[in-house]
Image (tube, rainbow, N blue to C red):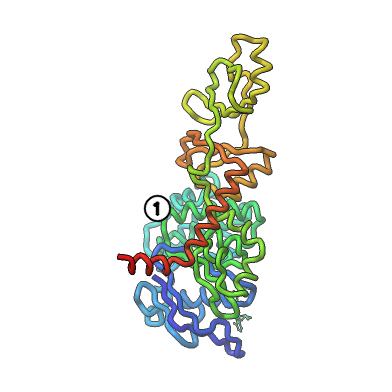
Amino acid sequence: MIRFEHVTKRYADGTKAVDDLSFEVAEGELVTLVGPSGCGKTTTMKMVNRLIEPTEGRIFLDGEDISTVDPVQLRRRIGYVIQQVGLFPHKTVLENTATVPHLLGVKRAKARERAAELLDLVGLDPKVHGSRYPEQLSGGQRQRVGVARALAADPPVLLMDEPFGAVDPVVRERLQNEFLKLQSQVRKTVLFVTHDIEEAVRLGDRIAVYGQGRIEQLDAPAAVLGTPATPYVADFVGADRGLKRLSVTPIEESDLEQPPVVRLDDPLPHDLGAPWAVVLDSSGDLHGWISAEKAAQAGEGARKATVREHARRMEAWLPLGASLKQAFATMLQHDAGWIAVIDHEGTGRFLGVLTPARLHEALRRSIDADAQAVPRTEVEVESISSR
Ligand SMILES: Nc1ncnc2c1ncn2[C@@H]1O[C@H](COP(=O)(O)OP(=O)(O)OP(=O)(O)O)[C@@H](O)[C@H]1O
């Protein structure tokens, strides 16, 4: 979808910001460009929408050499989100979002309708926020409007230059998660600039790690963390890359343990057969947990007691597919020895529990999968020659 062929950018003062860059981004792929300040990420991005012209080389969009396309026409096919969103201060959020479709000739009413849909898509209620002015929004909300506006003309390509850089870490993580969900629906081809390796790892289908004006490694996040191509990349991703791997490894159903399960309306059992049991409501959704000790003590006195009276609510839970990092953080936050895992389709159905031992096993699995991924070509050669 986007292809760089031997692209170099030399500024007038002689600075070589980008040096003989060749790479390709597939349709619907999200590639993060990550590297230290001044390594040429922004220059790379701005050459795609022709805010900057390359000195040498060519860039293709959908097979077309962009130097032959009128820049205004080109930019209609490319959404652009930057850190300082640049919303019109005197226009409401809805008007800001509707501006581009309106400029493209969409009738005002239709453009506003589309803008409301987009605001909804980025997690802003158009009825509540649509009539506000940018200064009446939080930083995170303004960034969401920026994303909505970039999507307004439904461009196939999105360029995002540190879009979540100016908000605090908690809001940033929420925006990243929302953006991932959004991207799974809209499947744009995205170039995403960041200097934060965690962000690059969390969002990218692939990560391009920049050295000075060049890409040192372009690979899937797990590969960049697991098998850095050069000492520079190893240094950049950091010695704690085992920890970062936690954020790219999802909880899978096979990681879960199946503890004893009781229902809220069951009579209080005398013996759970384990130190604790998970408590579900009548429809199989997670309610909480009950300790065997509590159950035994209470059971001695009250014959007719049910689980309900002695169950405790469970705060430490996550949907299947959440990262091991979230699992670890949730355990720490609730000081929990295990966390419950529920169906990620939002049905709330209880699937099992993740214990620290299982978390460790899952992390090992992820590291081993990488180790196996490296000599894959050798394996293929072997299987071909043994035919
Ligand atoms: N207009 C310009 N004239 C001269 N040099 C420039 C110009 N714009 C950028 N540069 C230089 O080109 C190099 C790459 O800059 P660029 O903005 O692409 O880096 P970056 O990786 O995006 O950095 P940051 O993360 O700090 O934004 C830097 O050395 C920068 O100083």
Q: Position of residue 185 (x, y in %)?
A: 42, 53
Residue 1 appears left or right of 245: left
196 or 123, nearer to the observer: 196
Q: Position of residue 191 (x, y in %)?
A: 49, 67
Does the Cβ of the disc 1 residue fall within 8 Å of ligand 1?
no
Residue at left offset 46%, top offset 56%: 183
Residue indicated by mark 1: 109
Q: Position of residue 196 (x, y in %)?
A: 62, 64
Q: Is residue 190 visible?
A: yes
Label 1 SS: helix
The vertical placement of 126 against 13, above or below, is: above
145 or 182, nearer to the observer: 182
Residue 286 appears left or right of 68: right
350 or 270, nearer to the observer: 270
Residue at left offset 52%, top offset 62%: 371
Of all residues shown, which one is farthest toward the left?
Answer: 387
Identify residue type, mark 1: Ala
Residue at left offset 38%, top offset 79%: 69
Q: Quadrant of residue 18?
A: bottom right
Q: Residues within 10 Å of mark 1 (few under 14, many from 20)?
A: few
Residue at left offset 37%, top offset 63%: 105
The vertical placement of 55 against 300, above or below, is: below
**Where, quadrant-wise, is the N terminus in this rendering?**
bottom left
The vertical placement of 119 against 21, above or below, is: above
Q: Quadrant of residue 290?
A: top right
Q: Quadrant of ligand 1?
A: bottom right
Of all residues shown, which one is farthest toward the front?
Answer: 386
